[in-house]
Image: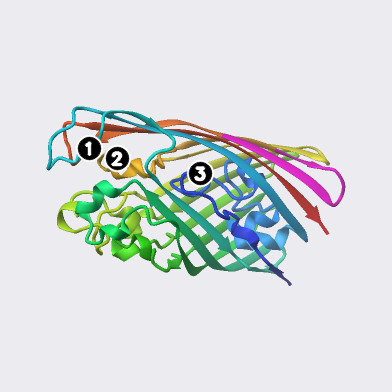
């Protein structure tokens, strides 16, 4: 029996903006350079200390190590409005195409997850991470929605507001056969304090809890020096009113910020991730991956999602790790998420249509130190 405690700077989406790492909705496609190089797969195969963000049980198998790195990211987003401007009471937008910086919102999140893992029998482990969450939010350029809010002074342009919250994540990881591993993890809803400066925007007076997430995966090593990974991830966006409530009919029956106020109308997401790793030599490994999840934004909700166009579906990734010594590893990763467009009517000016489009590029490098 082996018990291990790891201080998990583990959920390391530390301060990742909603408009910056918004690949599966507004969550990153994976955690840690190694997992990201395989499209985020790794629930059944943990290889670094960041792995607890996917499955806390995996910390039982990574040994004593410290990992750190950085990522560069380029989201290329735009929206296009077609159709004439109608007089009030229609809520028309100015026709044209508008790129990247614009009216919008910025959401940054930090998760602190001290992780306890227990290898309760040979190659079988359970893990739990109490999660302390911190998030910051800012909205600009939303003054036009003032008639829909009971508190227009808490709607837009109020600078950055922050909130703390808490929850937990649990997981299992282990060997099923000599060549097959499995893993499961679940993170509950993280209960957050309200964004008081934006209580006139988000449903339930500024509430913005962090939704629950499920991960399940297998990893197969039946081909010498190769691993093949399959993960399924499910994110419950719809259960948080500020994210899941639709624009209509809610905007007609309640005001922004009310318990049943309009939200972004996001559906739940289920993402399938396939990963491959080849240990070419004892010192060098190559990785590749692909993932797909239907975007959470329907064509009926394009108007509000001009602010947060999380429309990405496909991700293609590659990566490597090179060991310079028994103690020092360097890993790299790059990914591409091709353009996705969602088109729908402006529900408050039906003679207009809105296109949301975005594609993304990113790369990261990390260093691992074993001790």
Can you see residue 207?
Answer: no
Labels 2 & 1 near each other (Cβ < 8 A):
yes
CA gap between label 2 and label 3 equals 19 Å
CA gap between label 3 and label 1 equals 25 Å
Q: Residue at x 43, y 68 (%)?
A: 191
Which residue is most to the right? Answer: 325
Q: Earlier in the sequence, mark 3 or mark 1?
A: 3
Indicate which label's residue lies in the foreground, 2 or 3: 3
Q: Secondary structure at mark 3?
A: loop
Residue range (magenta): 320-335
Magenta run includes residue 118: no
Question: Relative to 202, does residue 325 appear above or below in the rendering?
Answer: above
Q: Residue at x 24, y 63 (%)?
A: 258
The residue where tag 3 is placed is: 20
The residue where tag 1 is placed is: 346
- Which of the labelled discs sits on residue 302, or is there none? 2
Where is the N terminus found, in terms of image quarters? Answer: bottom right
Q: Secondary structure at mark 1?
A: loop
């Amino acid at each position: 029996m082996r018990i291990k405690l790891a201080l998990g700077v583990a959920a390391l989406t530390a301060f990742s903006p909603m408009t910056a790492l918004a690949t599966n909705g507004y969550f990153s496609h994976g955690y840690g350079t190694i997992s990201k190089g395989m499209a985020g797969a790794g629930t059944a195969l943990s290889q670094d200390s960041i792995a607890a963000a996917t499955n806390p049980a995996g910390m039982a198998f990574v040994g004593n190590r410290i990992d750190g790195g950085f990522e560069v990211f380029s989201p290329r987003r735009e929206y296009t409005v077609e159709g004439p401007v109608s007089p009030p009471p229609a809520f028309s937008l100015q026709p044209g195409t508008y790129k990247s910086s614009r009216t919008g919102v910025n959401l940054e999140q930090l998760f602190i997850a001290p992780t306890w893992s227990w290898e309760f029998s040979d190659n079988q482990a359970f893990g739990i991470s109490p999660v302390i969450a911190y998030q910051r939010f800012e909205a600009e350029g939303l003054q036009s929605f003032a008639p829909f809010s009971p508190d227009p002074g808490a709607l837009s342009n109020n600078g950055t507001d922050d909130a703390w919250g808490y929850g937990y994540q649990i997981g299992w990881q282990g060997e099923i056969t000599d060549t097959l591993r499995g893993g499961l993890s679940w993170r509950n809803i993280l209960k957050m304090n309200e964004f008081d400066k934006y209580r006139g925007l988000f449903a339930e007076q500024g509430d913005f809890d962090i939704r629950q997430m499920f991960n399940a995966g297998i990893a197969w090593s039946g081909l010498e020096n190769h691993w093949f990974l399959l993960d399924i991830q499910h994110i419950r966006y719809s259960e948080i009113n500020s994210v899941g409530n639709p624009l209509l009919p809610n905007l007609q029956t309640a005001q922004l910020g009310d318990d049943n106020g309009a939200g972004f109308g996001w559906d739940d997401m289920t993402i399938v991730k396939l990963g491959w790793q080849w240990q070419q030599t004892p010192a060098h490994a190559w990785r590749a991956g692909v993932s797909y999840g239907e975007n959470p934004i329907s064509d009926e909700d394009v108007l509000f999602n001009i602010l947060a166009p999380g429309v990405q579906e496909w991700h293609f990734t590659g990566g490597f790790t090179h060991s310079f010594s028994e103690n020092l590893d360097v890993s790299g990763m790059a990914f591409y998420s091709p353009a996705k467009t969602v088109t729908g009517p402006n529900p408050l000016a039906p003679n207009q249509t809105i296109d949301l489009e975005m594609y993304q590029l990113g790369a990261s490098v990390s260093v691992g130190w074993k001790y």
